[in-house]
Image (cartoon, helix red, strand yellow):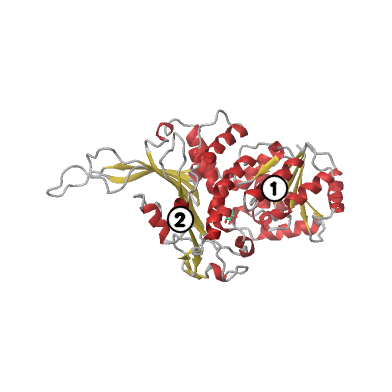
């Protein structure tokens, strides 16, 4: 299949860090369709050779097995070319069109890895230049807007130029192997389905913690914050994958219909839940891996009086028959104690105890997303330990079954962006987000944003290298639970 893959923002960070390495891995694995061309688009005045050279320089910094040998890079570099464009100038789109017309292709992918403010201009200009053919697919990176209105405005313009089946809205969390395995666990096995409901589950916790701070993205992050950056998209998509009903088949719309129902059933916010069930935090100076790190307000590009949140913890419920009354907790933050993403499904304790079990513990299933990719099922067992005088009954100890997918399937597994890029080339929409899902997620998040705008208190400080403000633990403790896996 001959394809042209055009990266708008072709000299930008995402292309260097994620997209090119992912394409290279697909190339190396032999899964990238043959006859492809990767066209970087940017403002810099570069020749094809200079663009290849700049990509090579970035690849030289890649560590370990993922770094290409010089022969491998030379073969991969044959696919790369470059078009200089000022994205606001119609004549520059004509130059792109000429480049695309050099050869016959089955598929043209326009990947918009630019600032979202440019999305509508690019789509309109693509249409004006006749570049919205039926063979064209468009990929939109998040964030798609900063609230419901701006999201709808972007979707409306893109929707005028492309049909929904041509639009691939990326949420890279959906491409992670662990999320694929969550679907496999739920819909390819019968074991957990009877237990996957309010009668058996006490609470579900989603944690997405990063050790990194905002790095060089302070300017971007200032206008974004953790709620828009991680909760509106990644966390809610994970929540949908956990809570959705089994779809009638594996087609994109069957899956997306079920996810949409979950988003629609999320408990609406009230003034009371907004003040009690949503905690925002901002990191202050601290230490990560034994090294001192600055606070958010001292990061480059950040206003010294910023009230942007770098941490969010919240509690919600899903108002439907399966989940009524089960708390779902979401927690995400930068500069936390560890890089750790997982989902904990906490089951209810036994209704009647005949053994001594450690206080407050019950069975749980932990779905590890990163850095480990696997499943842990926590159970209770008893060894043949001696009993002391006066002890009655048997004492149980927590044990767990541990399934490590990296060990089981090898570390050469397909990464998130590799998987998603191949799906775009293949025209598979299953792992991409539909406009109505996105809008529903914004609709749910927006009252939180409005509440914060009107709230003079601002985010609570937490030391870098910790698990966030203590109010986050207090929130969950009020329900009689605690955050799991904090060590
Ligand atoms: C991105 C956010 O969507 O996800 C970043 O914009 C964040 O701020 C990143 O660091 C986290 O992704 P991952 O795959 O490293 O967990």
Which residue lies at the image location 60% right of the left edge and 68% below the top edge?
Answer: 302
Image quadrant where one finds the C terminus: bottom left
Comparing marks 2 and 1, which lies closer to the viewer?
2
Residue position marked by numbered label 1 in the rendering:
153
Residue 363 in view in this figure: yes
Crowdedness of circle 1 by 10 Å Cα count: few (<14), some, many (20+)? some
Q: CA distance from mark 2 to mark 1?
A: 30 Å
SS at mark 1? Answer: helix
Which image quarter: residue 365?
Answer: top left
Which residue lies at the image location 70% right of the left edge and 58% below the top edge?
Answer: 12
Residue position marked by numbered label 2 in the rendering:
275
Judged from this view, the residue extending furthest toward the top is 248
Q: Earlier in the sequence, mark 2 or mark 1?
A: 1
Q: Relative to the observer, which residue lies in front, 51 or 187?
A: 187
Q: Is residue 384 left or right of residue 111?
A: left
Q: Position of residue 254 (x, y in %)?
A: 59, 32
Q: Position of residue 264 (x, y in %)?
A: 54, 39
Q: Position of residue 461 (x, y in %)?
A: 47, 66
SS at mark 2? Answer: helix
Q: Position of residue 105 (x, y in %)?
A: 80, 39
């Amino acid at each position: 299949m001959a394809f042209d893959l055009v990266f708008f923002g072709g000299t930008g960070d995402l292309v260097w860090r994620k997209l090119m390495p992912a394409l290279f891995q697909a190339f190396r694995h032999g899964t990238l369709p043959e006859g492809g061309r990767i066209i970087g688009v940017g403002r810099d005045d570069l020749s094809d050779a200079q663009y290849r050279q700049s990509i090579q320089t970035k690849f030289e910094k890649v560590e370990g097995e993922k770094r290409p040998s010089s022969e491998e890079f030379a073969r991969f570099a044959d696919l790369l070319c470059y078009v200089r464009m000022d994205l606001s100038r119609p004549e520059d789109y004509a130059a792109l069109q000429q480049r695309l017309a050099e050869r016959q292709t089955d598929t043209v992918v326009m990947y918009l890895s630019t600032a979202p403010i440019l999305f509508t201009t690019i789509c309109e200009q693509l249409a004006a230049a006749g570049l919205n053919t039926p063979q064209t697919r468009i990929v939109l990176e998040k964030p798609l807007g900063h609230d419901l209105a701006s999201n709808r405005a972007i979707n409306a313009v893109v929707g005028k130029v492309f049909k929904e089946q041509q639009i691939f809205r990326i949420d890279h969390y959906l491409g992670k192997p662990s999320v694929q395995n969550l679907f496999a666990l739920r819909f390819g096995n019968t074991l957990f389905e009877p237990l996957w409901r309010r009668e058996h589950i006490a609470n579900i916790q989603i944690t997405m913690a990063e050790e990194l701070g905002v790095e060089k993205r302070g300017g971007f992050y200032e206008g974004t914050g953790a709620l828009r950056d991680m909760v509106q998209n990644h966390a809610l998509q994970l929540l949908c994958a956990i809570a959705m009903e089994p779809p009638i088949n594996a087609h994109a719309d069957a899956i997306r219909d079920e996810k949409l129902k979950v988003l629609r059933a999320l408990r609406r916010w009230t003034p009371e839940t907004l003040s009690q069930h949503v905690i925002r935090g901002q990191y202050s100076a601290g230490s990560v891996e034994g090294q001192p790190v600055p606070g958010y307000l001292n990061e480059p590009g950040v206003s010294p009086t910023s009230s942007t949140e770098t941490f969010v913890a919240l509690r919600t419920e899903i108002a439907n028959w399966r989940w009524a009354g089960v708390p779902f907790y979401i927690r995400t933050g930068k500069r936390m104690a560890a890089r750790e993403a997982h989902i904990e499904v906490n089951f209810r304790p036994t209704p009647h105890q005949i053994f001594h079990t450690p206080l407050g513990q019950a069975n749980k299933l932990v779905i590890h997303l990163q850095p480990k990719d696997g499943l842990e099922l926590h159970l209770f067992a008893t060894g043949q330990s001696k009993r002391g005088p006066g002890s009655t009954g048997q004492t149980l100890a927590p044990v767990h079954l541990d399934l490590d997918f990296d060990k089981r399937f090898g570390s050469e597994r397909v990464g998130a962006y590799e998987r998603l890029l191949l799906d775009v080339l293949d025209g598979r929409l299953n792992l991409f987000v539909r406009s109505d899902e996105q809008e529903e997620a914004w609709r749910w998040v927006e009252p939180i944003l409005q509440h914060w705008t009107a709230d003079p208190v601002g985010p609570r400080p937490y030391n870098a290298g910790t698990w966030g403000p203590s109010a986050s633990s207090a929130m969950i403790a009020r329900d009689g639970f605690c955050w799991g896996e904090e060590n």
